[in-house]
Image: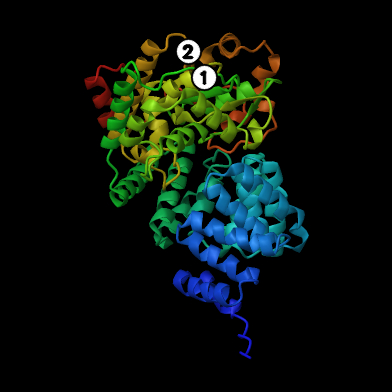
Amino acid sequence: MAAALPPPDFTAARAALAAGDLNGCAGIAAAAVQSHPHLAEGHFLFAMALGEGGRIAAALQAIDRATDLAADNPEYQAQRARLLTLARREAEARAAADRAAASAGAADARTLDTIGCVYARLGDHAAALPLFEAAVAMAPDNAEYRFNLAAAYGFFDRKADAEAQYEAILRRDPAHGRAHFGLAGLRRQTPAANHVERLERALDAARDPIDRLRIHYAAAKEYQDIGEHDAAFRHLDTGNRAHKARTGFSIDADARNAFAIRTAFDRSGYFTGASRVEDAPIFVTGLPRTGTTLVDRILSSHPEIASAGELQAMPLAIKRLAKTPSRLVLDMETILAAAGLSPDAVGRDYIDRARQHEGARHGRFVDKLPLNFLYIGYIARALPNARIVCLRRNPMDSIWSNFKNLFATTSAYYGYSYDLVDCARFYLLFDQLIAYWRAKLPGRVLEFSYEGLIDDQEGQTRRLLDHCGLQWDPACLDFHANAAPVATPSAAQVRRPLYRDGIGQWRAYERHLAPARDFLIRQGIAID
């Protein structure tokens, strides 16, 4: 009779995973799965190694086996939920997160934080917050957990609590770029109370290029707050030049996509057919940082409307149904492949995806992904009852606002924002595409002026509600009293009544912005 095999050394596999040795972890876990297939831990660690290596589909197969063997293990369910979000299977991710949360009393800090991150990704920040708090209480020295908690506090306007968490991180790591950036954005700094000297020291200490980029942005924001405009621009220009050089970004792909969209919709048979989808979401589109969050807040202050945040549901619906192999959500191949898609199928896929997010689970909702302006033709045909709003703002204020705000550093969507002339070129692409939709889809898109709203709040709010098929409600004028969380860089602004500070802000940087201004003038775009 053969001797029983010794139990696998899962401690070594976990140590290898923690050290980033994915091959080492996978090797131990794979051997354990072969020799002891009834042990859930082997399947779990194999899934973790696969997932960290980017093999999400294979990782999900392995972790499904682990949760079959140990359904009540909160760590396994939490990591399964995380992998499901990466696979864009949000409804299943929510169910797995709920199962993990039900056993949270037995969870460790990492598991609590993971569940919280899943809820946050699904837009349920109220569910995420207590989990982040519990993770920090359990592991107070972990900067990642503290950062997630600080960000969550910021979404709920708990500035003092968020500030305490950021400061705790910086006491341990003075060059922590995300903490500096988060702290700078919490409030408007003053000449008497700011962090600019500490930020300059942090730059000297920072070695990671993304930390340095975030510190540059934090410094720029604080210098602007205190009126030192040359110093603000110097930090932005230095950080953005270095980041663009690292990424090798070219705006040519954006230009090709915009041209391909117009060319495609000019063809009579492109993306045609009936859609029977009755849902009537409201899409708030436009360039980022031009008032989209403000309009979202106004609309979601109406008792019939909820905010779903910035959903990826429409881009992902087109991408999934087009079945193109590239890793890019939008590219020439996907635009061409969308020709034969059914608008009804796209609309149903969109609604199915959107309803998995907290703000869109019931009733009418706002999807405020700004760059949905690229998808307006698809939205109009796939969702015949949808209402579409496009924010318009002074071109130079739009360019300045995009250049001075840090977006997701790994997203191809925002690569243009690290160069002034790229910002100007992207504005031109936007302007041309909106003009195209205006001619192609008369009456479907409300072009809504940020400056017009500031000048005539009630009149423009009534116009907005009328376009969206909503009855007048005075709560929409008091949008700043809306207590719902805000998970965008505009959180502080939309908690104030309307103000004029953002109009003409670019003028303080007119000398520095000359390349962008001159480009627009050459293209015949009025800058005033």
Q: Quadrant of residue 364?
A: top right
Give coordinates of residue 338: x percent, y percent.
38, 29
Task: Please report the residue visible at 53 percent of the width from the left and 29 percent of the height from the top.
Answer: 368
Q: Which mark is residue 415?
A: none
Q: Earlier in the sequence, mark 1 or mark 2?
A: 1
**Direction left: furthest residue:** 522
Q: Are marks 1 and 2 in contact (CB under 8 Å)?
A: no
Residue picked out by circle 1: 275
Q: Quadrant of the N terminus?
A: bottom right
- Mark in the foreground, 1 or 2: 1
In this view, the residue in front, 234 or 124, is 124
Q: Quadrant of the C terminus?
A: top left
Pointer 1: residues within 10 angstroms few (<14), some, or many (20+)?
Answer: some
Image position of 305 (left or right of 450): right
**Helix or strand or loop: what does disc 2 sit on?**
loop
Residue picked out by circle 2: 444
Instruction: Give the CA separation, mark 1 to mark 2.
Output: 16 Å
The answer to whether residue 168 is visible is no
Image position of 506 (left or right of 195): left
Which amino acid type is shown beneath numbered disc 2?
A: Arg
Task: Please report the residue visible at 38 percent of the width from the left and 31 percent of the height from the top.
Answer: 400
Which amino acid type is shown beneath numbered disc 1?
A: Ser
Give coordinates of residue 223: x percent, y percent.
45, 42
The answer to whether residue 474 is visible is yes
Give coordinates of residue 56: x percent, y percent.
49, 55
In this view, the residue in front, 123 or 513, is 123
Q: Is 461 located above or below residue 160 in the figure?
A: above
In this view, the residue in front, 231 or 253, is 253
Q: Is 282 located above or below residue 467 in the figure?
A: below
